[in-house]
Image (spheres, helix red, strand yellow):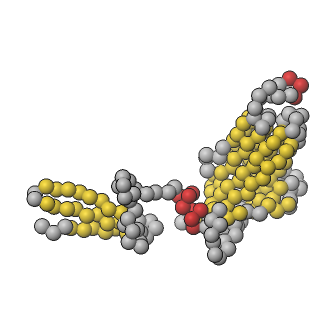
């Protein structure tokens, strides 16, 4: 009996071939994944499916961006204003902050701050031939009043000691939880060094932009 073949397409338009093989009365089912260029989507040794996460996929598509900087704060704060455009190409964002000492972080929505110094958003696909600039922008040290924002999250890490000194190391706030930011909205990220000592801090704002369907 000849093999029967069923083909379907996934959300990306790639063809998935499902082949049922009948041989000597024994029914064997084999699923083979074929990409749109005809190559196998399986590892040749283990036959496991070759996959990337969707955020990783967005790097390949040229739609993922990052703003990062290292700063030193001593008993002071630094603000970052994140502004989304009035479109349905939404920013899916994670924020990572690492500090060497006692550090406090807040992120609020609907800030009324304005301006600030522009920070370049680097596309994480460095092989793009046609530039694909980010539509969400980031500035630091904006001005103006805070307004009546909504607190999205707060985080504190590090080990304070009496007199503002340090008894141990710092810590990290990792943005494992992704936020889909509201369009046409300003977010204010505030990073504060609580101790009166030099606090080496790494700020990483990472996002991809995806058209909402």
Q: Is residue 50 visible?
A: yes
Image quarter of residue 26 = bottom left
- Across and down, in percent, residue 140 comes to 83, 55
Residue at the limit of the structure toward the top, as seen here? 162
Q: Residue furthest bottom?
A: 130
Asked whether, in this view, residue 2 is left or right of residue 84, the answer is left
Query: Residue 210, how many percent across, how many down?
Result: 59, 64
Q: How many marks?
A: 0
Asked whether the viewer can see residue 184, the reply is no
Residue 10 screen position, x and y as percent? 41, 65
Q: Is residue 71 left or right of residue 62?
A: right
Quarter of the image with the C terminus is bottom right
**Residue in the picture at 69% in, 58% down:** 66
Which residue appears at 81% of the width and 42% of the height? 200
Quarter holding the N terminus is bottom left
Picture quarter containing residue 15?
A: bottom left
Please state the horizontal and vertical placement of residue 120, each as a whole percent of the image.
Answer: 77, 63
Above or below, 74 against 42 in this view is above
- Note whether 136 is above or below 129 in the view shown: above
Q: Is residue 14 above or below residue 101?
A: below
Where on the picture, by quarter, is residue 35? bottom left
Q: Residue furthest front?
A: 45
Residue in view at x 61 percent, y 46 percent: 177
Residue at 16% over, 56% down: 27
Q: Is residue 149 left or right of residue 175?
A: right
């Amino acid at each position: 009996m000849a093999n029967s073949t069923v083909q379907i397409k996934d959300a990306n338009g790639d063809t998935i071939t499902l082949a049922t093989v009948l041989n000597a009365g024994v029914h064997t089912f084999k699923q083979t994944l074929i990409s749109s260029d005809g190559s196998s989507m399986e590892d040749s040794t283990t036959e496991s499916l070759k996959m990337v996460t969707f955020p990783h996929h967005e790097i390949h598509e040229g739609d993922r961006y990052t703003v990062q900087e290292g700063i030193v704060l001593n008993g002071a704060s630094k603000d970052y204003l994140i502004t989304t455009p009035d479109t349905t190409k939404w920013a899916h964002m994670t924020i990572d902050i690492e500090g060497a000492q006692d550090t406090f972080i807040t992120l609020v929505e609907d800030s009324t701050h304005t301006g600030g110094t522009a920070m370049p958003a680097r596309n994480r696909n460095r092989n793009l031939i046609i530039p694909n600039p980010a539509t969400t922008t980031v500035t630091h040290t904006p001005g103006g009043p805070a307004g009546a924002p909504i607190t999205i999250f707060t985080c504190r890490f590090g080990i304070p000691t009496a007199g503002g000194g340090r008894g141990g190391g710092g810590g990290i706030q990792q943005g494992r939880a992704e936020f889909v930011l509201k369009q046409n909205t300003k977010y204010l990220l505030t990073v504060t060094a609580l101790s009166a000592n030099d606090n080496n801090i790494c700020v990483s704002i990472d996002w991809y932009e995806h058209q909402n369907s």
